[in-house]
Image (cartoon, rainbow, N blue to C red):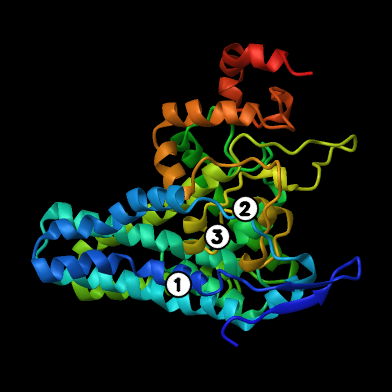
C-alpha cells in the first residue's frame, strides 16, 4: 500500500487508526543532501560561478522562510500504533538510501572543484557548500547510529566517514546522552557561553571522550585500542581511503578543499549541539546522581520544513528522553523549551552572540521549570556574576 493505515487498540481498549500524512514528504531528507548540484548545474549551464552560492541561499535564507511559511506541526502518532509505524521498512529504507548520496555529493563537488577553472573564491565557496552537506551526513549517522542492527551501525560508520567524524557515534551515544544538560558535558552549551567558546570545548572534547570510551571498551575485551576492532579507526580508515583517493586524483589543491569541507561539516554539528541544550540543566538528587533526562532538558522545534529535511532531528526533546525511537515516531510535548525558528534560522543567530543572548537568555529564564532560578540553569562559570547582575531582578522574583 502506498500509504497504509495503522490500526491498534490503545490502553483504554479503544480502536485507533493512524495514517502518516507526511509519509512521502520524509523523502525530503534523502533528496536534500543533493542540494550542491543545484549550484553546480547553474554554473554548468550559465558559466557563471556565482551559481555555486545558490545552495547556501536555499539553506540559510530559504530554510527560515519556509519554516515561517509552513509553520509548525505538533501532531503525534498514537502510541498504540508506534510499534507498527517503527516496524514499517519504508522509513528505514530512506535512511539507508541517503548514505550513498552523501558520498555522491562530496565526490561530485570535489570533481567539479578539481576539473573546473574556478576563481579562488568560488573554489572556497564550493568547499563550504560541500561541508554543509556533509554536516547533514552527521545527522544521518545520528539517526542510524542510535539503532541496534548490524546494518544500521555499519551504515552510520560509513556516512560519518564522509566528513571525517568517525568518533561521533561513540561520543554521542555513550558520552553525550549520559551527561547531557550537565556541566560535565562538553556538548551541552552553557548560558552566557558564545558558540565560539563552546566550540573550543566541544570539538576537541568529543574526540578525547570518544577515544577514552572506545579504549575502555576494547580493554575490557582484552584488545588494544589500536586494534581493527576500534570503531573510530574503522570509520577513519574509510575517510582516509575516500579523501586520499580524491587527493590522488586532483592533487594538493584538494587538500585545502577537503580541509574546509571537513571543518565546515564539524561546525554544522557544533552548531546543532549548541542550540539543542543551551543553558538547560538536569538536577542532582540527594544521592548526588543526576535526574533522568526529561523532555524539558532539550530545546525542541516543530518547524515543518527543517524537520522534513533533517529526519525530524529538531524534535530533540523526545529523542533524548527516548533515544531508541525512530524519527517518524518522535513526539511533541506541551510546555517544552521551544526554539523560535528551525535550525537553519537558529544557526546564523548563534553566529552573532549578542543577538543570540538577546533572544535566548530571556526565553531560557522564562521556562516554566526555571522561572528565573539560576540554580536550575547550566551557567557559564566565568559569566555567572555578570548574568546574575544583569538578570538579578528576574532571578529574585521567582515564587
Residue 344 drawn above or below residue 24: above
The structure residue drawn at horizontal position 66% and vertical position 71%, both measured from the top left corner, is 147
The structure residue drawn at horizontal position 79% and vertical position 18%, both measured from the top left corner, is 399
Q: Which mark is residue 55?
A: none
- What's the distance in space between the residues labelled 2 and 3, CA to CA? 17 Å
Q: Earlier in the sequence, mark 2 or mark 3?
A: 3
Q: Is residue 206 left or right of residue 146?
A: left
Give the mark toward the camera: 3 or 1. Answer: 1
Image-quadrant location for residue 385:
top right
Which residue does the numbered mark 3 point to in the structure image? 168
Residue 94 place in picture, x, y as percent: 52, 77
Q: Earlier in the sequence, mark 3 or mark 1?
A: 1
Mark 2 neighbour class, 10 Å CA radius: few under 14, some 14 to 19, many 20 or more = many
Residue 360 place in picture, x, y as percent: 54, 31
- What's the distance in space between the residues labelled 1 and 2, CA to CA? 20 Å
Give the mark toward the camera: 2 or 3. Answer: 2
Which residue does the numbered mark 1 point to in the structure image? 30
Mark 1 neighbour class, 10 Å CA radius: few under 14, some 14 to 19, many 20 or more = many
Residue 230 place in picture, x, y as percent: 59, 70
Would residue 32 be visible to someone looking at this image? yes
The structure residue drawn at horizontal position 80% and vertical position 70%, both measured from the top left corner, is 80
- Closer to us: 154 or 310: 310
The structure residue drawn at horizontal position 81% and vertical position 43%, both measured from the top left corner, is 291
**What element does badge 3 sit on?**
helix
Which residue does the numbered mark 2 point to in the structure image? 316
Would residue 259 be visible to someone looking at this image? no
Pick the quarter of the image with the N terminus: bottom right
Amino acid at each position: 500500500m502506498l500509504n497504509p493505515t495503522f490500526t491498534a487498540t490503545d490502553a483504554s481498549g479503544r480502536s485507533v487508526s493512524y495514517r502518516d500524512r507526511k509519509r512521502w514528504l520524509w523523502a525530503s531528507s534523502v533528496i536534500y543532501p543533493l542540494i550542491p548540484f543545484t549550484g553546480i548545474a547553474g554554473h554548468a549551464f550559465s558559466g557563471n560561478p556565482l551559481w555555486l552560492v545558490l545552495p547556501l541561499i536555499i539553506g540559510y535564507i530559504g530554510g527560515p522562510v519556509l519554516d515561517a511559511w509552513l509553520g509548525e506541526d505538533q501532531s503525534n502518532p498514537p502510541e498504540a500504533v508506534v510499534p507498527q509505524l517503527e516496524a514499517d521498512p519504508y522509513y528505514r529504507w530512506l535512511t539507508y538510501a541517503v548514505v550513498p548520496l552523501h558520498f555522491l555529493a562530496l565526490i561530485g563537488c570535489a570533481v567539479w572543484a578539481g576539473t573546473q577553472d574556478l576563481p579562488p573564491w568560488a573554489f572556497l565557496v564550493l568547499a563550504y557548500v560541500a561541508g554543509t552537506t556533509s554536516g547533514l551526513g552527521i545527522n544521518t549517522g545520528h539517526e542510524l547510529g542510535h539503532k541496534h542492527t548490524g546494518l544500521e551501525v555499519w551504515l552510520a560508520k560509513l556516512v560519518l566517514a564522509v566528513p571525517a567524524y568517525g568518533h561521533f557515534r561513540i561520543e554521542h551515544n555513550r558520552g553525550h546522552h549520559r551527561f547531557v544538560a550537565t556541566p560535565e558535558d562538553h556538548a551541552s552549551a552553557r548560558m552566557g557561553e558564545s558558540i565560539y567558546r563552546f566550540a573550543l570545548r566541544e570539538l576537541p572534547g568529543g574526540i578525547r571522550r570518544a577515544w577514552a570510551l572506545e579504549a575502555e571498551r576494547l580493554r575490557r575485551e582484552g584488545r588494544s585500542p589500536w586494534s581493527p576492532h576500534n570503531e573510530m579507526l574503522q570509520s577513519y580508515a574509510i575517510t582516509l581511503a575516500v579523501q586520499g583517493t580524491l587527493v590522488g586524483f586532483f592533487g594538493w589543491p584538494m587538500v585545502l578543499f577537503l580541509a574546509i569541507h571537513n571543518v565546515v561539516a564539524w561546525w554544522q554539528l557544533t552548531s546543532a549541539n549548541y542550540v539543542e541544550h543551551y543553558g538547560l540543566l538536569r538536577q542532582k538528587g540527594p544521592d548526588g546522581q543526576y535526574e533522568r533526562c526529561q523532555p524539558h532538558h532539550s530545546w525542541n522545534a516543530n518547524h515543518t520544513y527543517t524537520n522534513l529535511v533533517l529526519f525530524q532531528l529538531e524534535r530533540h526533546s523526545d529523542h533524548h528522553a527516548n533515544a531508541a525511537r525512530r524519527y517518524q515516531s518522535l513526539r511533541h510535548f506541551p510546555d517544552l523549551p521551544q526554539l523560535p525558528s528551525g535550525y537553519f534560522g537558529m544557526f546564523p543567530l548563534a553566529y552573532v552572540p549578542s543577538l543570540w543572548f538577546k533572544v535566548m537568555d530571556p526565553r531560557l529564564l522564562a521556562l516554566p521549570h526555571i522561572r528565573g532560578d539560576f540554580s536550575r540553569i547550566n551557567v557559564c562559570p566565568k559569566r555567572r556574576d555578570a548574568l546574575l547582575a544583569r538578570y538579578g531582578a528576574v532571578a529574585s522574583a521567582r515564587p
